[in-house]
Amino acid sequence: MIYQTAQDWRGADHKRLLLFGMSGLGKTHVSNALRAGGDWFHYSIDYRIGTRYMGEHIADNFKREAMKVPLLRDLLMTDSVRITSNITFDNLAPLSTYLGKPGDPARGGLPFAEYQRRQDQHRSAEVAALLDTPRFIERAHALYGYAHFVCDSGGSICEVVDPEDAADPVLRRLADELLMVWIEGTEADTADLVRRFDRNPKPIYYQPDFLGEIWARYLAENRLDAAEVDPDAFLRWGYAQVLAHRQPRYRAIARNWGVTVAAGDIARVRNAEDVTEVVARALEARRSAP
């Protein structure tokens, strides 16, 4: 790790963090608090994915839908209108919409093969965006003069790396540049995430083998063909399983590559000083652990 002790961290002229964990536990909250102080550059992996690496896919999907409307088709064919994604740090809906959900097309679902294709695109984009992080660290300092840097990773980071491989190319590159910080939730946090997801199921990235396993099991248990699946019902059914699948992978990243902070402590963070103390305590806890 680039900071071995709390003293190293507190005294660092250039503090660099990568936050990881399930969406909804505070990664963006902390990143926004740091950015608001003026000295921290906020690099969002999901924003980078949605703009640099999947922006063209997203815009083409919008255009594909617009071409079904005669008026819009005529305007597009004569370059009279422009259709683009207005993705922001706080609104990643264009990326989620493109990633989509598998199942019945009449209920907004995608054929499973197309869904897998988009999942593969997302995996490649996420790896590329993560590997871009060191370049953005350099740019943030050289171009804009930011002293500190926070990488707000996607919830699926654990699905595109092997945390038990000391030579994993993504984790190795990241750990050489930033302190990896897992925001760990409690059972109550997990239950709250499930309730929130149940109210508004959103597209999600799955590790390919895991996706194939739960998709096949869902079809078998419900005696459905792929085109009969209610997309939201499948996402709701699988969400708790996704959380359980990711938890040990997050834990392994923290054990082998970084530190762990409690989601409850993160919820109380209001500024950079709070973040410094939370991370310092995590480093002290790691150093004192048997």
Image (cartoon, rainbow, N blue to C red):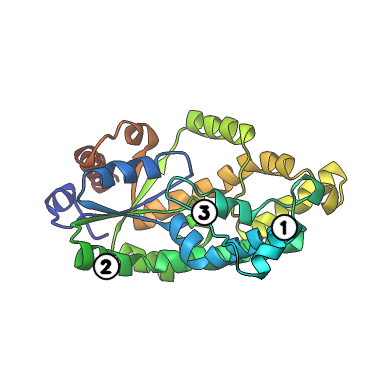
Numbered tag placed on residue 139 in the rendering? 2
From the image, which quarter does the N terminus lie in? bottom left
Residue 68 visible within the image: no
Disc 2 is placed on an element classified as helix
Which of 174 and 53 lies nearest the eye of the viewer? Answer: 53
Q: In 3D space, how far apart are the residues under numbered discs 3 and 2 (Cα atoms)?
A: 25 Å
Q: Quadrant of residue 121?
A: bottom right
Relative to 57, is 35 on the left or the right? left
Which of 50 and 25 lies nearest the eye of the viewer? Answer: 50
| Mark 1 surroundings within 10 Å by alpha-carbon count, few (fewer than 14), some (14 through 19), many (20 or more) | few
| Mark 2 surroundings within 10 Å by alpha-carbon count, few (fewer than 14), some (14 through 19), many (20 or more) | some
Residue occupied by mark 3? 156
Q: In 3D space, how far apart are the residues under numbered discs 1 and 2 (Cα atoms)?
A: 43 Å
Residue 192 visible within the image: yes
Is the C-beta separation of discs 1 and 2 under 8 Å?
no
Report x, y in % for residue 234: 72, 43
| Mark 3 surroundings within 10 Å by alpha-carbon count, few (fewer than 14), some (14 through 19), many (20 or more) | many
Which of 271 and 22 lies nearest the eye of the viewer? Answer: 271
